[in-house]
Amino acid sequence: MKFKPANNIQDLQYFGEFGGVNPSISDSSTYTFLSAKTMFDTFEGNADGCYLYSRHSTPSNLYLGEALAAMEGTETANVTASGMGAITPVIMQLCGSGDHVVSSRTIYGGTYAFLKNFAPRFNVKTSFVNITNLEAVEAAITPTTKILYCESVSNPLLEVADIAALSKIAKKHHLKLVVDNTFSPLSVSPAKLGADVVLHSLTKFINGSSDTVGGVVCGTQEFIDELRNVNDGACMLLGSTMDSLRAASILKNLRTLHIRMQQHSLNASYLAEKFEGLGLKTVYPGLVSHPSHKLFKSMMNEQYGFGGMLTIDAGSLEKANALMELMQEKNLGYLAVSLGFYKTLFSAPGSSTSSEIPEEEQAEMGLTDGLIRFSIGLDADIERTFEMMKACMIELDIIK
Ligand code: PLP
């Protein structure tokens, strides 16, 4: 049967201990054992179904992890306190001193900063490449490379990674392909295309209510066990554990992700077409003008569309800032970083979420001053939203 991620989430049944339709929340940091021997076995990782201490795992975190693993089609998953709390342990687990990473140059600014400025302290170096140039990717691989890192749809330029082709390169050179799928949950299933590890910031679309941070690592049982190992597991030892209360609330929001993604995609697709029609430089994977439109189409789970993220170029930072302020004044969205909220969010990445990337490198990758990144909301009347946005652009002389 065809892999259908939303069905996989729906088919999981977890009941509360009194028959509740939602699982009970494990409100404990530690767990009792009836015998000292079982406690010892649990420490050694040999007592399935026993809980030890909540930094290691909790029933609530396991429920959420299993639902996300079902969504991504991986054996299992480990939820974490934030997206960065998922990304950094994965890199530290897979690389030691002297190892090397080949990474897309267009990635979330925090991940870029970690690879560029922080990991070298542990003698882990990174080569940043244009991920859409497969020859450049392969040429950057060295005998010490351990990870090929990318985002399915990149932040903020919305470049699309050819996951199947990258997976072939990774396999050929015995690397792990690590894919951050934060921008395209449900739409793209990286593990099905050959990714070894799939990451998410749950803070964004998956939770969808901009009220918490969270992350997840989806992968094989073996890799997740390694991350949780009490002796040398990066998740266990670096301590970026999710709280059970949050895991329970994110699991409830996950149940409506498919409906939200469909509406985000529908609205973003409508606005992208209209913006392009106004003559604005618009980037959206659903537009035929997107250089990787066909590639995205070939990878996507069609019913969820091309996602909720788009960018336009307002011409200059001043115009971008004025437009965002005016749109906020008209209650068309919020001038805020992050994504996946019911309300449209917009920011100028060059001076916010990607400001960690030096200006010359921003210019080289095509990140212009006037770029506005939109996370399109769940507006019921997107035609009205467009007319109001267009009026703002006319008022500011961005379009005629
Ligand atoms: N990955 C992507 C693509 C992101 O956009 C972000 C945050 O903006 C992160 C990872 C980091 O996630 P968090 O803020 O939950 O740590």
Image: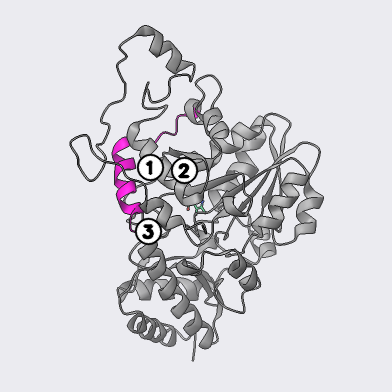
Q: Are marks 1 and 2 in contact (CB under 8 Å)?
A: yes
Q: Give the percent coordinates (x, y) of residue 134.
A: 76, 58
Label 2 sits on residue: 216
Q: Give neighbour class at mark 2: few <14, some 14-19, many 20+ (Cα, 10 Å).
A: many
**Residue range of the region highlighted in magenta in the rendering:** 238-257
Res. 198 in view: yes
Question: Which residue does the image show at 72% across and 34% down from the upper left?
Answer: 99
Q: Residue furthest bottom?
A: 400
Res. 308 in view: no
* First along the sequence among labels 1 and 3: 1
Q: Determine the secondary structure under disc 3.
A: helix
Along the viewing direction, whichever of 64 and 11 lies nearer the viewer: 11
Q: Determine the secondary structure under disc 2.
A: strand
* First along the sequence among labels 3 and 2: 2
Q: Give neighbour class at mark 1: few <14, some 14-19, many 20+ (Cα, 10 Å).
A: many
Which mark is on residue 64? 1
* First along the sequence among labels 1 and 2: 1
Looking at the image, residue 47 sits to the left or right of residue 29; the answer is: right
253 magenta-colored: yes
Q: Determine the secondary structure under disc 1.
A: helix
Label 3 sits on residue: 257
Q: Give the percent coordinates (x, y) of residue 100.
A: 72, 39
